[in-house]
Image (spheres, rainbow, N blue to C red):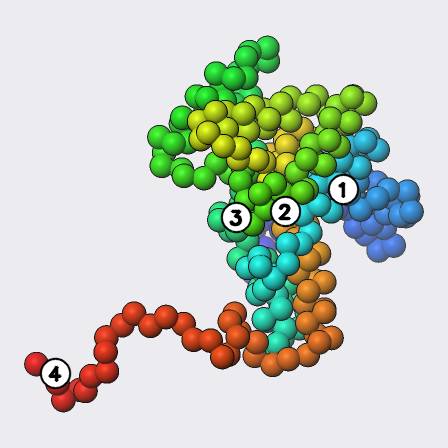
Amino acid sequence: MSEPRDREPCEDWWRTSIIEMQPGMIRYRGYPIEELIGRISFPAMIWLMLRGELPSDGQAELLGTALMAAVDHGPQAPSIAIARMAMTCGVGINNAMASAINVLGDVHGGAGEQAVELYQAIAARAGADGALEPAVAAELAALAGRGVRYVPGFGHRFHPIDPRAPRLLQVVEEAAGAGVVSGRFAAIGRGIEGALEAAKGRRIPMNIDGATAVIYAELGFPPPLCRGLFVLSRAVGALAHAWEQHQQGGRNKGPIPRQYLWTYQGEDRRSPNDRK
């Protein structure tokens, strides 16, 4: 029996504008790979793959700065601890990295995406030339109205001041001075800091998620991609820790030392004969 005439050819099973490939030819977004190799950086390649065009040198440098700043926060971070634990279970590095990446959710790993959403909402409320202060206040009130207790991108459970954030904001200011970005989202981030301090009576400074979110918003990345960019960044830390744990050895290393036990909150000892 002949194939139906209206059936799509097998070449259309997947459709993509990202890569074109034939025997002996690979093009990313129309650029031959051999013309990209040795000419553009890894951050520039990420930009090309995600955005479809090559970035300016300043844009690529700023993206690379955000990516390198968030690679690791030690085994205190659940994702990194999980990568190390996984390696002691006899899996490969790819499994350990995947285990780490799979826990980067809304609470651990999602704050950058949420911060970009907040910044963009403030920018939209303020308009092109509007005042930021009332827009910041309105969006923070909206967050509180939805029951959000923690403003994404601000405060840190370990660092009184996250050492990464001030330097990242300085880099953004330098990029704004060079005309690479507008600096508007950096101003929004600082406006949130000021509003939180006024409301709480103490400073709640921007953290790494808030600072990298400033960069991603300045560069025009949509919020969902910002979580993906954080995953790319933190994958480097997961790889490094998984490899180090492989070199150190160890078997079945759990989340707490074996001499410590968890707190039991269940029933006292009982017998099945005591059933009513």
Residue 178, which numbered label?
none
Name the residue located 38 percent from the left edge and 32 percent from the top edge. 144
Q: Secondary structure at mark 4?
A: loop
**CB under 8 Å between discs 4 and 3:** no
Q: Earlier in the sequence, mark 4 or mark 3?
A: 3
SS class of the residue under badge 3?
loop
Instruction: Tell me the distance, in whole angstroms, between the alpha carbons under discs 2 and 4.
Output: 53 Å
- The residue to which callout 3 is attached is 157
Side (left or right) of 157 relative to 238: left
Q: Nearer the viewer, residue 199 or 52?
A: 199
Q: Which kind of residue does numbered mark 1 sit on?
A: Gly
| Crowd tier of the residue under label 4, counting other residues whose Cα lies within 10 Å: few below 14, some 14–19, many 20 or above | few
Q: Is residue 130 above or below residue 249?
A: above
Where does residue 42 sit, x and y in percent of width and height? 80, 46
- The quadrant of the rendering that contains the N terminus is bottom right
Q: Nearer the viewer, mark 4 or mark 1?
A: 4
Structural crowding at the residue carrying mark 3, measured as other residues with C-alpha within 10 Å and reported as few (<14), some (14–19) or many (≥20): few
Q: CA distance from mark 3 to mark 1?
A: 26 Å
Of the residues under marks 3 and 1, which one precedes in the sequence? 1
Q: Of callouts 2 and 1, which one flags the residue occurring earlier in the amino acid sequence?
A: 1
Placement of 211 over or under 131, stated as above or below: below
Residue under pointer 4? 275
As drawn, the label of residue 64 is 1
Q: Quadrant of the C terminus?
A: bottom left
Task: Identify the residue shown where x is 68% and y is 79%.
Answer: 249
Q: Is residue 56 above or below residue 98?
A: above
Q: Which residue is mark 2?
A: 230
Between discs 4 and 1, the one toward the N terminus: 1
Position of residue 30 in the picture relative to residue 77 (left or right)? right
Q: Examine the image and state in which quarter residue 210 appears.
A: top right
